[in-house]
Image (cartoon, coloured by chain):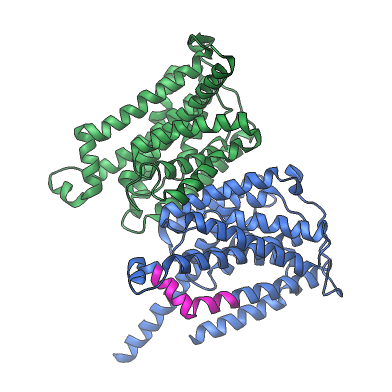
Amino acid sequence: MRIQTVGTVVLIACMALAPLYFYPFLLMKMMCMALMAASFNLLFGYGGMLSFGHAAFIGSSAYVTAYAAKALALSPLAAVLLGVLTAAAVGLIFGFVAIRRRGIQFAMITLALAQLVYFILLQSPFTRGEDGIQDVPRGMLFGVLNLQSGFVMYYFIFTLTCLAFLAIYRIVNSPFGQIIVAIRDNETRAASLGYDVNRYKLSLLVMAAAVAGLGGGLKALLFQIATLNDATYLASTDVVITAVVGGIGTMAGPAVGAAALVALDWLFAESEFPVMVISGLVFMLCVLLFRQGIVGSVIAFIKRRQEGIREAANV
Amino acid sequence: MDTRISGLIAQIFLGLVNGSIYALLSVGLTVIFGLLRFVNFVHGAQYMVGAFLSYLLLVHFDVGFWLSLAISPLVVGAVSAIIERTMISRLYSIDHMYGLLFTLGLTLVVEGLFRYWFGSAGRAYVVPDMLTGVVNLGFMYFPRYRLFVVLASMVLCIGTWLLIEKTRAGSYLRAAHEGPQLLRTFGVNVPLLLTATYAFGAALAAVAGTLAAPIYQVGPFMGANIMVVVFAIVVIGGMGSIKGTIVASYLLGVAETITKIAFPQAASMAVFVIMAAILVFRPEGLFGRQA
């Protein structure tokens, strides 16, 4: 537990100072990705629900945030909040259709429903078809802080990301989180103990959709554009890859996965070789050999060392 | 005959063509799922590679349609068998979701490489000489090639269904699903059976790709969109039921074209809306047994 606290403090301190040393735009992109992956991790890592439909939450929130900021001229926080609420509503609808199905079927159904959302977004007039919503203003936070500045934007995203991770931590470590894990491990037993399994799963899905929506909305403000790219199935698979590479079922996994994937993206930005091939290969290797992901492997390594030390002390 | 009714029948036939491609893909997917218990996410990429192989054989080696119809499934089946043996088979002992995740990664690699090599643009595959022109069905004229696709798909799908439900090999397959340990004690090579099943399913996808090449454009992402539709169809048919998926494929192919007449904009959404409706009112799918 000590190591976790120290690690968390160090990570937050590093991220707070990072824009002084690194290109803030990349770091902000990373945090948006981390939010989306954290949402997937909350759903799959703790709830056992494999979602292939995150694009629907990300895309719908990105469009609504962009529309609210540009056409409705709402403040950035209100625009993002509206996006988050939209994503949560999409999650609720997904839940009504898919919640009774488990495992692989849940994955396939969410993938299909996300494709439906894609077609709806494609044909709604407010999304402006292939062009997307461009030149989205970042606006003034609380009427005084101009988000057009990279630094101000950075700390805006940083604060919201920290709050979201704190919320996820609280959810996972609450009685609600315990029941969610119990349902993941043995749904029948949880039901026989009197828990309304579907209601718990639906709540978790809505929460996860809201977190993914936060990532999507912030991304729309950051890039100042919302396009169909955020709603294609490749957006969903990106989220899956990020979360699994980082480490499923760990708090830090999504953040580390996002850092790894954004770095990979940046390395291959110049070359013509498609980065999806590299990330696909990394993902295949991960599934075959390192199913715990980066963070999971590190935790396992530390545990093994501690046990080694303990055994040595006993001898 | 009333022109409106004949117009409707014409649309139904066009829907059957799409349904035929859906059926071939969903049957392959179901056969793999039925025995290996994971969803072969790379199925769409295998379909795309099948179409591309036939296209490349024609353009670079002047190999015709009929020979391609044999070569491309054999190549895709063989490569898939190697992938199953060396990689996918390592995942059987753990959660079935990892098979799905692994094939997801494989899909990105294959589709990414084909885009890198051949670009995103679609290419046209010329309809083979023997099958050009139209056939008079009495009430309408129908392109000869599309009629061939419908018939070929029906023969293959019903053949696969008979193979699994009625033959000795099929009974082994079903037994391998029920109790692999017991089957092994009878001297059946179960791992080989799994590899053969996977290769067979992949080969069916390549057949579908070759058949689809003259109808749709051949391009690196041709499999991606159709796969999401096929996933929805498999869910509608009730996962694991071959008969269910065949029927659902043709029904949805037809439903899609009929939607195209009534609400042109909603045609691409029809399958997904139907899937959602069925899940709400009949959660086990049309022909599914498990809850």
Which residue is at the front of the view, B50 or A109?
A: A109
Give the residues in magenta.
A166-183
Where does residue B44 sit, x and y in percent of width and height? 49, 39
Number of numbered discs present? 0
Position of A197 with respect to A11 (left or right) is: left
Residue B5, image quadrant: top right
Magenta segment includes B140? no
Residue B168 visible, this orientation: yes
Residue positioned most to the front: B2
Which residue is at the front of the view, A212 or B205?
A: A212
Q: Colour of chain A?
A: blue
Q: In this view, does B214 lie above or below B161?
A: above
Where does residue B185 sit, x and y in percent of width and height? 13, 48
Q: Colour of chain B?
A: green
Residue A273 visible, this orientation: no
Position of B257 with respect to A136 (left or right) is: left
Where does residue A174 sit, x and y in percent of width and height? 49, 80
